[in-house]
Amino acid sequence: MHPGKARSIHLVELPEPSVADVPGGRGVLVEVLRVGVDGTDKEINEGLYGAAPPGQDFLVTGHENFGRVLEVGPNVPTTIKPGGLVVSTVRRPGHSLYDEIGLQDFTTDDVYYERGINLLHGYLTERYGEDSQYVVPLPESLHEVGVLLEPTTVAEKGINQAYEIQRRLKVWRPQRAAVLGSGTIGLLASLILRLRGLEVVCCSLPKAPYLNSDLIKELGGTYVSTQDLTPGQAAEQYGPFDLMLEATGFSPLVFEAAEALGRNGVLVVASVTGGDRKAEVPADKINQGFVLGNKVMVGTVNASRDDFERGVTDLIRAEAIYPGWLGKLLTTPVHGLDRFQEMIDHLEAGDGIKTYVQVK
C-alpha cells in the first residue's frame, strides 16, 4: 500500500529475503503460512495512517503473521529450528529508555516502528527474514490456530497490566469481569479471563443468538446485548465488575464503563479511536467513583515478547480446555496474495470474525 493514498493496495515482486540480511548470525528465514488482517490494514488502505520505510513509497502490510522456519543463522537459539512454527512480534525498538530494556510497546518516542504498520514492512508476503530475538516459536499442535497469536497478545497485555497494577492491593482477587465488544479481541479477552477463572460478561451491540454470542456461552460466559442492557445495568445485574476491558471501537462506551466499574476495579481501554466524536458524561459521578472507589483506567497498545509467550501458553490451554473453540474464530479465509481485493472487501463488509490470507 502507499500510505496516505486511499485504496492503493497492489501486488508487487520483491527481492528474496535471506538470513544474511540480519546481522550477527541471528537471521531467521520464514515461509509465511497465514496472515490475519484487521481494521488496521483496512485503515492503512484508506490512507488514514501508516508510513513507508525510509527511501520507499510503499508499505508491505500485514502484522498478524504465522509461518514455518526455512533457515536459521549460526547464532539463532536452538528453540527456533527449520521446520518449526513461529510468529514474529510487531513493534521494534526506538530510542527511549523503555525501548532499550525490551519494552518498546511502552516507548515514549514520538516515532515508533511497527512491522506492517509504521516505517517497517509487514508480513503479507511469501517469505520474510527476521532477527531471532523477535521470533516466538509455537508447538505443532497450534498449526491450525497459530495465526491468532498476535491478536491474542493484545488481550494478554491488557489483562496482565491490570494484574500488575493491582499488585498494590496485595490481595486483589478479581471474581467478575466485563468485556465490551465481541470482535476478535473481545472474544480472545473473554477466553483469557475464563482461563484465569473469572466469571465473564461480554457486552456487545448485536442481539443473540449469533456466532459470537454462542462462542461466549461455550466459554461458560454470559452474553449481553447493549440494546437490552447498558454496561451500568449489566453491572447491577451481573457485577460488580472487578475488571473491565473495552474493545468496541466506540469511545463513548469507555465513559459508561468507567461509571459501571466496581470498587478497586481496573478498566482497560484497548480501542484506538479516530475522529472527533464527543459525548456528554456524568463527570462528577465518575470522578467521585474513581476517587472513593480506588479505581484505575489504563490504556493498552501493542505487546511485548512476554505477552507473545504468555499467549502461546494460553492458546495451548484453550485447545485443551475448550477444544475447537479457537478454530471457530477463523471464519473468513482468502486464498492467495493475488486475491488482495477480496481481503479488503471482507474487511470493509465486516463479515465474520477473523479474516485471514492463506498464503501457503
Image: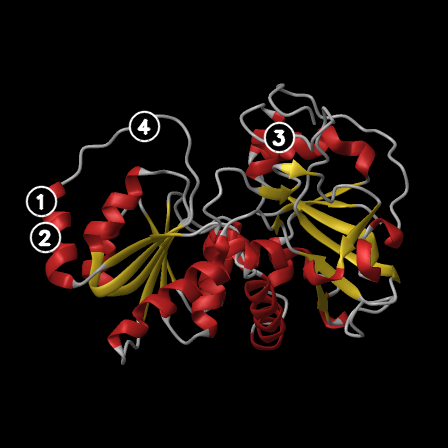
Q: Which residue is mark 1?
A: 284
Label 2, residues with CA under 10 Å away: few <14, some 14-19, many ≥20:
few
Q: Amino acid at mark 3?
A: Ala
Q: Amino acid at mark 2?
A: Gln
In the image, taking residue 91 as reference, residue 167 lies left or right, namely left
Q: Residue at x 23, y 51 (%)?
A: 258
Which comes sooner in the sequence, label 3 or label 4? 3
Q: Residue flagged by tag 4: what amino acid is it?
A: Arg
Q: Which residue is mark 4?
A: 277
Mark positioned earlier in the residue sequence (4 or 1):
4
Q: Nearer the viewer, mark 3 or mark 1?
A: 3
Mark 3 to mark 1 CA distance (whole Å): 40 Å
**Tag 1: residue type?**
Asp
Mark 3 or mark 4, whichever is nearer to me? 3
Mark 1 surroundings: few (<14), some (14-19) or many (≥20) residues within 10 A: few
Asked whether the residues under the numbered discs 2 and 1 touch, taking CB atoms below 8 Å apart as contact, a structural biologist would say: yes
Name the residue tied to disc 2. Answer: 288
Q: Which residue is mark 3?
A: 51
Q: Earlier in the sequence, mark 3 or mark 1?
A: 3
Give how far apart the Cα atoms at labels 2 and 1 are: 6 Å
Question: Which quadrant holds residue 306?
Answer: bottom right
